[in-house]
Amino acid sequence: MEKHNDKKLETEVLVDQAWRANEKSGRYYEMTYAGATSFLRRKYSRKLKDIDVAVSGVPFDCAVTNRPGCRLGPRAIRSASVELASLNSYPFGFDPFKFINVVDYGDCYLNTHAPSSIEVSIYNHAKTIIKSGTKMLTLGGDHFISLPLLRAHANTYGPVSLLQFDSHCDTWEPQGPIDHGTMFLTAVKEGLIDIDSSIQVGLRTHNDLDVGIEIIDIRYIHENGIKKSIERILKRIGNNKCYLTFDIDVLDPAFAPGTGTPVCGGLATWQALEFIRSLNNVDFIGMDLVEVSPPFDHSEITSMAAATVAHDWLCVMADKKRKLNL
């Protein structure tokens, strides 16, 4: 009969490292098809001392104007992220968690039966994380969640540069208090955004209202390419504190069918990733990734794209810290 080394088994994390791991940044081999699916297998924790980034879900989709379902987005993105946690990151070639401490903070609790409480709940949830000195990577949820998140960030950092990847401008006039197509107009009116250093990328819907945010529409990207578009982004943002909001519908529906308001003619997944990987000179204070609707997805391609975008943003953050320590 085969004998097992029980002492060794007690000290190794073989499965469910999301809650069994003792170290903040240690990474262990785990079957990709099993175990607790935290984002990138990070430890579930609400202890934020010495934590660089807290990943957090906001499972809300009551502000949508078309298809629902993105309240299930955080869970799906976490599940799709497990393969990304199994190898050193491409094209970076390193384990990002050797350079930054990241935890999965879990989800923001929301009482969806009391809609008037939603904004305050998200704001307080974000404020708790930000005041600890930890940056946020937030998984939505519909795009409305960016408004209370921006309020929480602006409360600490002042007006921030907004870098928005989206097929919609989301600066239409509000039709009600909770609407995922109007929150950035509200943010402008509240002074949360520094208009002169903010930019929207990938837009392909029309709005007569110009709020002063620079726009790189999808035709410009297709005609001029990623490199010139990146140059415009970096010039616009400069050295300002920047908040990144990434609506998965910036991707063409061929690459992200699982979203609430798909618009044809968008970015390919590889283009989106090249954008993110080229932003290492931006002074990011936080990021959200929104509008993943698993009920309309196919073979997890939308969730995988979302997980990879978020993963690559963490790698950019890790690479910046790595270079500081060289």
Image (cartoon, grey):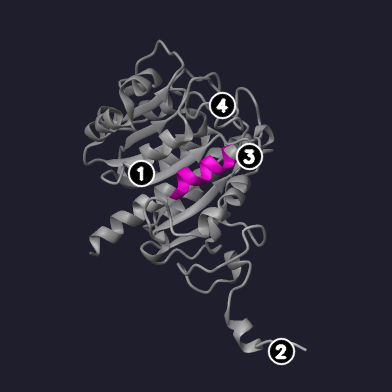
Dot 1 falls on a residue whose secondary structure is helix
**Which residue corresponds to the image point at 65% horizontal and 39% vertical from the top-left?**
299
Q: Position of residue 35 (x, y in %)?
A: 66, 62
User: Quick check: is 146 in the magenta stretch?
Assistant: no
- Say which residue label 2 marks: 3
Alpha-carbon span between mark 2 and mark 3: 47 Å
What's drawn in magenta, residue-wise? 302-311
Does 143 sit left or right of 280 as displayed?
right
Looking at the rendered structure, which numbered label has been put on residue 253?
4
From the image, give the main secondary structure of the stretch colored magenta: helix
Judge by depth and name the residue closer to the eye, 77 or 272.
272
Looking at the rendered structure, which numbered label has been put on residue 125?
none
- Say which residue label 3 marks: 71
Q: Earlier in the sequence, mark 2 or mark 3?
A: 2
Does 158 sit left or right of 256 as displayed?
left
Q: Position of residue 309 (x, y in %)?
A: 46, 43
User: Quick check: is 310 in the magenta stretch?
Assistant: yes
